[in-house]
């Protein structure tokens, strides 16, 4: 008995099957461009003189790392949770007056989500706004993952929510969501250290990814506004992918040109 399957990718224009896949990145708010770094391809530090059979020169390791990109944390934050008079969890900035982020802005950047939205009643969930958007003109799935390749001497007191979605039909701003398990420990985030990774799945899977800065074209802006408005009225947004693909312009990704 023999089985076979196929993957239908007719929701986008005909895509090449060889050569690199172009993936564009941009910021939802361009005014913060100086604060947020470009995503960096992951690469383990290796001694150039190491033996050929060393781990740093293993083809499998190199190939895997080449498919992950690190998004660095833009802020220095030291946070802990306490309860207010009503018993609700509130965030406290442990750096106080020495914090580079004003408390008024901190409330806009990071918040505790309503308890009804938590996975566990004793594990508060935070959401940090990080306005990165990724887009492609051929089938590409993005996975948002914790920075598991990076060692930290201050492990985070919980786990990051991971997610996967198609950026060729649903280019949306990413949010860093964190489930706080050990409430006795602070959450320490350092500017310049990886906040999370993004991984890109291509068709076929062996094609490399070329990450470029996406131009903020009229077509892309209009498309982002269209699908962004739908998020406010529908819970299961995956059900909208087919309609979004049908309304999608043939080209969304253009590389941003450096200023002359």
Image: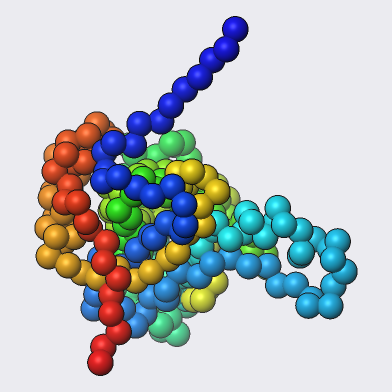
Which part of the image, by quadrant, shows the C terminus?
Answer: bottom left
| Relative depth, front residue between 36 and 115 | 36
Residue 15 location in percent, x, y? Answer: 34, 47
| 21 sits left or right of 132 in the view | right
Residue 180 location in percent, x, y? Answer: 50, 50
Q: Is residue 133 visible?
A: yes
Residue 69 location in percent, x, y? Answer: 51, 62
Q: Is residue 163 visible?
A: no
| 61 sits left or right of 49 in the view | left
- Residue located 46% across and 36% down the image: 120
Residue closest to the far top: 1
| Relative depth, front residue between 91 and 235 | 235
- Residue located 63% across and 67% down the image: 43
- Residue located 84% across and 66% down the image: 52
Residue 103 location in percent, x, y? Answer: 32, 74
| 246 sits left or right of 108 in the view | left
| Relative depth, front residue between 202 and 187 | 202
The relative height of residue 208 versus residue 247 in the rendered view (above or below) is below
The relative height of residue 8 versus residue 171 in the rendered view (above or below) is above
Identify the coloring.
rainbow
| 47 sits left or right of 20 in the view | right
């Amino acid at each position: 008995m023999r089985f076979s399957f196929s993957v239908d990718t007719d929701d986008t224009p005909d895509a090449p099957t060889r050569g690199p896949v172009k993936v564009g990145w941009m910021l939802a708010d361009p005014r913060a461009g100086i604060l947020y770094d470009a995503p960096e391809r992951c690469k383990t530090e290796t001694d150039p003189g190491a033996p050929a059979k060393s781990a740093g020169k293993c083809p499998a390791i190199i190939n895997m790392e080449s498919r992950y990109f690190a998004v660095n944390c833009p802020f220095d934050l030291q946070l802990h949770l306490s309860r207010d008079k009503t018993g609700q969890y509130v965030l406290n900035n442990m750096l106080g007056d020495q914090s580079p982020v004003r408390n008024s802005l901190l409330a806009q950047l990071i918040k505790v989500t309503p308890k009804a939205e938590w996975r566990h009643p004793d594990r508060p969930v935070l959401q940090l706004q990080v306005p990165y958007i990724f887009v492609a003109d051929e089938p590409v799935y993005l996975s948002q993952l914790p920075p598991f390749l990076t060692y930290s001497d201050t492990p985070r007191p919980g786990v990051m929510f991971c997610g996967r979605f198609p950026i060729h039909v649903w280019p949306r701003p990413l949010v860093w969501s964190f489930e706080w398990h050990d409430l006795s420990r602070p959450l320490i985030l350092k500017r310049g250290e990886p906040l999370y990774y993004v991984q890109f799945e291509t068709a076929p899977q062996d094609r490399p990814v070329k990450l470029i800065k996406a131009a903020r074209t009229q077509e892309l802006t209009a498309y982002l506004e269209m699908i962004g408005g739908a998020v406010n009225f529908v819970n299961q947004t995956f059900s909208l992918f087919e309609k979004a693909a049908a309304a999608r312009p043939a080209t969304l990704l253009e590389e941003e040109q450096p200023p002359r």
